[in-house]
Image (cartoon, rainbow, N blue to C red):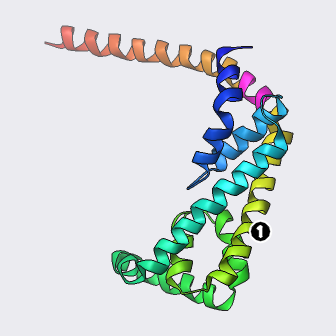
Amino acid sequence: MTVLAHYITQYGYWALFIGCLAEGETLTLLGGIAAHDGLLHWPWVIALVAFGGTLGDQLLYFVGRRYEGRVISRLKSQEKHLARDRSLIARHPVLFVIGVRFMYGLRIIGPVLIGASRLPPVHFVPLNILGAILWATLFVMLGYFGGQAIESFVTGFNKKLSSLLLVALAIVAFLLLRFWWRRRYSD
């Protein structure tokens, strides 16, 4: 077992949990790849990712509920977007709470806005758990089933990158030599 594989099996679950408290798509995909490679067990990866995502969003939701006025006042520059988001929360709370995990740019601020919108915890908590389970399952399985494809792409990319880097270095060396030559003999 390589050193990296040892660290992944030793600390991978903790890294997934901590990483998914706030963000986590990249870590979640990597957790799926690690599960594909047999370094982590995929049911545990899904469970920890869902738990970390749920806990993180719960904390952000309660921050939004507790500090509603301060949160909104700090986001005055985004007033147009806030009005739209608050309207969506009011009209479609189920879709917004579940879908906020999948909306780029709203992953962190979304739960805060939901809390500030005064959506009752009795509605938020179960929807948050459901959204976290769907999100975790989707991204872990994307990593799991895409693991082989990603590995072959990265391996091929590394070979291409090495060749590209060599060409880029040759071009930079040529341009520097040309610049030096022109400066030296243009005076």
Q: In the rendered structure, which amino acid carries the disc numbered 1?
A: Leu
Camera sees residue 103: yes
Judge whether 168 appears above or below 71 on screen.
above
- Label 1 CA crowd tier, 10 Å (few <14, some 14–19, many 20+): some
Q: Is residue 106 magenta?
A: no
- Of residue 1 and residue 135, the one placed in the foreground of this image is 1
- Residue in view at x 83 percent, y 29 percent: 38
Q: In x, y percent, where is residue 9?
A: 71, 28
Judge whether 153 appears above or below 184 on screen.
below
Judge whether 131 appears above or below 35 on screen.
below
Q: Which residue is mark 1?
A: 130
- Residue in view at x 74 percent, y 23 percent: 156
Camera sees residue 106: no
- Residue in view at x 64 percent, y 54 percent: 52
- Of residue 16 and residue 37, the one placed in the foreground of this image is 16
Q: In x, y percent, where is residue 85?
A: 56, 81
| Quadrant of the drawing holding the C terminus | top left
The stretch of residues the image draws in magenta is 149-156
- Locate residue 174 relative to residue 180 in the image: left or right: right
- Of residue 144 and residue 10, the one placed in the foreground of this image is 10
Element type at mark 1? helix
Q: In x, y percent, where is residue 22?
A: 55, 56
Residue extending furthest toward the left: 187
